[in-house]
Image (tube, grey):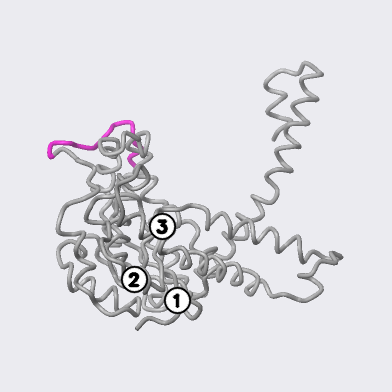
Amino acid sequence: MPLSTNQINKPIFVVGSPRSGTSILTWCLGRHPNMLALPESSWMGDLAIDLAICYQIGTARGNLSVLSAMDVPREEFFASFGESINDLILSHRKDLEGKRAGPSRASTSSVPSAFKRTDAKYEAKARWVDGTPEYSFYICGLCKLFPKALFIHIVRDVTSVVRSMLNFHRVTGIHLVANEEEAYNYWLRTVSSCLLAERAYGPRVVLRLQYSDFLDRPESTMRSLLDFLGEPYTAECLTPLEKRINSSNVPADFKIGDPETNPNLVEQAMRLSTEVEKKPQPPEASPTAFDEMEAAFNERVRYVATLNKEYQKAQQIITTLRKENAGPTTYIQKLI
């Protein structure tokens, strides 16, 4: 029997490049009797940044706030919000699963039938899984909100991903990327970020999963995955794989190789794709990689915290230059 909801705060995040299988893996895990699959979100990563800014303000030297007066540790500050998010999600799991199991609605009509539950097992679910690809860039912040969170980095070869991205509009009518170069860059950025997290936190926190293994050896791969998550195996997690879903409908004769694409970028992505496929993830966490992630997180916090101030400064300069009838060159020089 799963533990009560107030004892479990170990969410699961499926990260990696879009079109790498993040959605299907999330829904497979959502078929588990103890895991609730959430719709893709984007707010938790931004929340971590905002909380870091709030903590800085609340503990600033000379600030007589409750945080500074009570010496509230940064880790505790983040984790308390994470606990509230976890409790909030689990307390509404019945509502989410009920909508999926009920009549088709506008909000759920795009969900393939293989992804919809038809039973009432949601009462027992004590964990949740989120497969938002953009969280690849927020792993550090998510670890602060959820210190016991686990991450699955699903990685697919870059050529397949680029072809799928460029054909994404066939499914949704929305262009995921503007061109081939953007697709390569998107894959490279997300995968590089996840690989850094692999090194920073180690295989006990971040597990790399090959997309090809997931499709070619689904049962053994799922067993290993659930073992990593600390959950018992259930064959129901493989149900969404019985039918090909969420495909980009890539034509068999569709080719990539836009001459406008930066060849150095393509070479870099191809080289990393081959390396990730052949080289296993590091067996231990790296303090150096951890420090690098912390530095990047703190830099992002600094950037967001000063963004409004810098914007107002730029607006003031523009207003002054307009009054002086300055030319465009002067505008740029002043802004820089």
Q: Are marks 1 and 2 in contact (CB under 8 Å)?
A: no
Q: Quadrant of residue 313?
A: top right
Q: CA distance from mark 1 to mark 2?
A: 10 Å
Whether the magenta-drawn stretch holds residue 15 is answered as: no
Q: Position of residue 227 (x, y in %)?
A: 30, 79
Residue depicted at 31% across the width and 64% down the height? 30
Residue 285 is labelled as 1
Amino acid bearing label 3: Ser
In the drawing, does residue 212 fall left or right of residue 78?
left
Numbered label attached to residue 281: 2
Quadrant occupied by the C terminus: top right
Q: Secondary structure at mark 1?
A: loop
Q: Nearer the viewer, residue 112 or 187?
A: 112
Q: Is residue 280 at all visible to an observer of this figure? A: yes
Spatial separation of the CA atoms under disc 3 and disc 2:
13 Å
Q: Are marks 3 and 1 in contact (CB under 8 Å)?
A: no
Query: In the depicted view, which residue is nearer to us: 202 or 111?
Result: 111
Q: Residues within 10 Å of mark 2 (few under 14, many from 20)?
A: some
The structure residue drawn at horizontal position 40% and vertical position 58%, both measured from the top left corner, is 96
Label ID, residue 192: 3
Q: Which residues are magenta?
A: 252-263
Which quarter of the rendered picture does the N terminus lie within? Answer: bottom left
